[in-house]
Image (tube, rainbow, N blue to C red):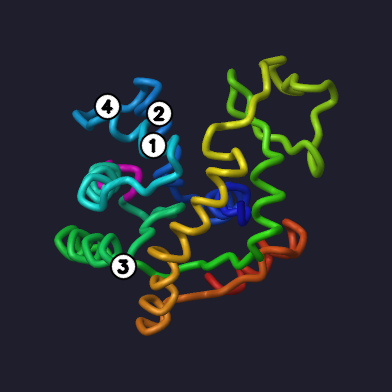
Amino acid sequence: GGGKGTQSDKIIGAFSIPHISTGDIFRSMIKGEYQGTFPVDQIRDLMNQGRLILDELVVNIVIDRLRQSDCRKGFLLDGFPRTVEQADALSMELDKLGIKLDGVINIEVKDEVLIGRLTGRLVCRKCGATYHSKFNKPKSDNVCDLCGGELYTRDDDKEETVRNRLLVYKNQTQPLIDYYTKLGMLKTIDGEADTDTVFAKICEALE
């Protein structure tokens, strides 16, 4: 809800690197589109409950993706790591691969703004395009402008699940801010500004 998906698209275009989103990987697994022997039913249940995927599992999935040839010149991790344990495990595995992270972007947005953004999000069942019931309405109600597909609200974007996700974030992910601050890698960006302003600040931090 902080806009990391939108900003990720801009970053990979500007820096010509692959975008690795754990959420996208999990959703592609559920659809049967991702190769590998991972427990898909377990992943689906955890996502629908707004809970985090088990650390060992998500790290293995990410490292499997980073071993692919398109990541050799760099990559953008989106939404991972989410816990200090994941960050430690990621660091150990990256050391084995001879890879070092250059920086960590923290897009900061107040809770009530996040809830408003997420609960109004609409996704196309056919092409995956995203809209918002308030900020980015489709031309026709519940119909995708791009392909005519049906728009729907994801289970993990319903208000009860969103509030649970925020609690999970505060309990398990917030410590990552201290973790990467101590390593001198954290770049905090105000995510409540307009999209272009946020992107300009991210590019400035990365460069």
The residue labelled by disc 4 is 35
Distance, label 2 to label 3, CA atoms, is 25 Å
Circles 2 and 1: CB atoms closer than 8 Å = yes
Distance, label 2 to label 1, CA atoms, is 5 Å
Q: Which residues are magenta?
A: 67-71
- Local secondary structure at mark 2: helix
The residue labelled by disc 3 is 84
Distance, label 1 to label 3, CA atoms, is 21 Å
Horizontally, residue 28 falls left or right of residue 156, namely left
Give me the residue at 44% from left, 57% from top: 168
Q: Nearer the viewer, mark 2 or mark 3?
A: 3
The residue labelled by disc 1 is 25
- Local secondary structure at mark 3: helix
Instruction: Identify the residue at the far left of this view.
Output: 96
Q: Nearer the viewer, mark 1 or mark 3?
A: 3
Looking at the figure, which quarter contains the C terminus? bottom right
Q: Nearer the viewer, residue 94 or 13?
A: 94
- Amino acid bearing label 4: Gln
Q: Is 68 included in the stretch rendered in magenta?
A: yes
- Amino acid bearing label 2: Ser
Is disc 3 surrounded by few (<14), some (14 to 19) or many (20+) residues within 10 Å? some
Horizontally, residue 177 falls left or right of residue 72, namely right
Q: Nearer the viewer, residue 193 or 46?
A: 46
Q: Nearer the viewer, mark 4 or mark 2?
A: 2
